[in-house]
Image (tube, helix red, strand yellow):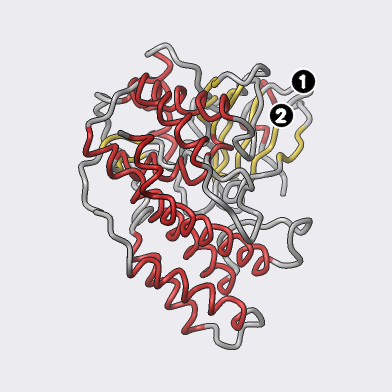
């Protein structure tokens, strides 16, 4: 893979090295010291997604918040298309630290404050999205996709391992007690902790990765955040436990910065549980399909094995949220 640096004449002579960690896009840092971030977009994200990124990040910056911004090509475009039809974009580099887990309660609180400031800044942004990711949190659709993967891959080497995990996920979804159809607003769409940037003292700096921008209900946005922030073990484990102390620290800080009405606060825990099982279903399906999520050979021997591990971890996290629901509700009162 040869990154098309020639599209950005001012950076064309800079060294490029891959950046590990992304599950979807291929990411590189440009320059030494780093001057920019280059991404090869996954085919699911068309070039027009960059129009949305440009509009929202410009608004956030105008509101006084730090944010990566797209660097236009020498021809003034937001991205470039290479000879193989892949879309590439360049973004400004925001110095700081990216973490894979919330390592302490102050980190949780900083995450809550940072996201609250971003939500407050975008509350009244009126933007017509050029790209809408269909079914991003359509949980019934994801559960149906899991059933389809099970039906189509009975001869897969991992089928006998995936099937019982999948059965538990499907049963957990069948017995879920929350509400799905709630009012929507402009959201980031993927607030896992690695999409937040911190400075060396642990203070929140900015959000990262904006392909998932769109409109969701606030409980989906924050439920997905809680799923990530309150799992100290991370996604590469078979057994995870939801940390109530992190949850309380994060959301107490959030509501101080950006208060939520009672009905939104009440929905967050149910939706956190739902998102855990939803992501577990996606990982379990890809353990058999082996065509979507990235994987790390230092974690598991194959694409399928890594995603089965992730599926088990997310399913256990969902069960942990459900078992603690009554005690966790106090943090949202």
For the point 32% across and 25% down, which residue is it? 122
Q: Is residue 207 above or below residue 232?
A: above
Q: CA distance from mark 2 to mark 1?
A: 8 Å
The residue furthest front is: 327
Q: Is residue 83 left or right of residue 255?
A: right
Q: Find residue 88 and report its horizontal and vertical position in percent.
A: 57, 40
Q: Residues within 10 Å of mark 2 (few under 14, many from 20)?
A: many
Q: Which mark is residue 316?
A: none
Q: Find residue 89 and report its horizontal and vertical position in percent.
A: 56, 35
Q: Is residue 148 above or below residue 50?
A: below
Judging from the image, what secondary structure is the residue with disc 1 in? Answer: loop
For the point 53% across and 24% down, which residue is it? 68
Q: Is residue 106 above or below residue 209?
A: above
Q: Quadrant of residue 99?
A: top right
For the point 37% across and 41% down, which residue is it? 221
Q: Is residue 245 left or right of residue 141?
A: right
Foreground of the two, 47 or 293: 293
Quadrant assignment for the C terminus = top left
Q: Residues within 10 Å of mark 1 (few under 14, many from 20)?
A: few
Judging from the image, what secondary structure is the residue with disc 2 in? Answer: strand
Q: Find residue 59 and report its horizontal and vertical position in percent.
A: 36, 20
For the point 71% across and 39% down, which residue is it? 19
Foreground of the two, 185 or 330: 330
Q: Which mark is residue 33?
A: 1
Foreground of the two, 108 or 33: 108
Check disc 2 and report the residue beneath it.
30
Q: Quadrant of residue 144?
A: bottom left
């Amino acid at each position: 893979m040869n990154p098309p640096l020639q599209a950005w004449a001012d950076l064309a002579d800079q060294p490029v090295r891959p950046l590990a960690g992304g599950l979807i896009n291929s990411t590189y840092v440009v320059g030494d010291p780093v001057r920019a971030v280059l991404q090869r977009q996954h085919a699911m994200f068309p070039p027009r997604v960059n129009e949305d990124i440009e509009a929202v990040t410009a608004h956030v910056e105008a509101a006084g918040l730090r944010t990566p911004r797209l660097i236009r090509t020498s021809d003034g475009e937001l991205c470039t298309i290479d000879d193989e039809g892949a879309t590439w974009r360049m973004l400004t580099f925001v110095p700081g630290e990216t973490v894979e887990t919330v390592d302490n309660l102050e980190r949780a609180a900083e995450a809550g404050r940072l996201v609250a400031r971003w939500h407050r800044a975008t509350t009244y942004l009126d933007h017509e999205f050029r790209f809408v990711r269909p079914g991003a949190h359509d949980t019934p659709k994801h559960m149906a996709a899991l059933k389809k993967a099970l039906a189509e891959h009975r001869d897969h080497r991992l089928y006998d391992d995936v099937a019982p995990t999948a059965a538990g996920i499907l049963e957990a979804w069948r017995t879920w007690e929350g509400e799905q159809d709630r009012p929507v607003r402009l959201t980031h769409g993927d607030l896992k902790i690695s999409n937040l940037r911190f400075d060396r003292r642990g203070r929140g700096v900015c959000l990262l990765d904006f392909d998932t921008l769109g409109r969701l209900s606030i409980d989906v946005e924050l439920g997905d955040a809680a799923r990530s922030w309150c799992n100290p073990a991370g996604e590469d484990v078979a057994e995870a436990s939801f940390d109530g102390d992190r949850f309380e620290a994060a959301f107490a800080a959030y509501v101080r910065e950006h208060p939520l009405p009672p009905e939104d606060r009440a929905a967050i825990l149910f939706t956190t549980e739902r998102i855990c099982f939803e992501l577990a279903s996606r990982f379990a399906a890809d353990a058999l399909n082996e065509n979507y999520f990235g994987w790390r050979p230092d974690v598991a021997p194959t694409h399928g094995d890594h995603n089965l591990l992730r599926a088990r971890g997310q399913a256990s996290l969902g069960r942990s949220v459900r078992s603690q629901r009554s005690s966790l509700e106090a943090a949202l009162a």
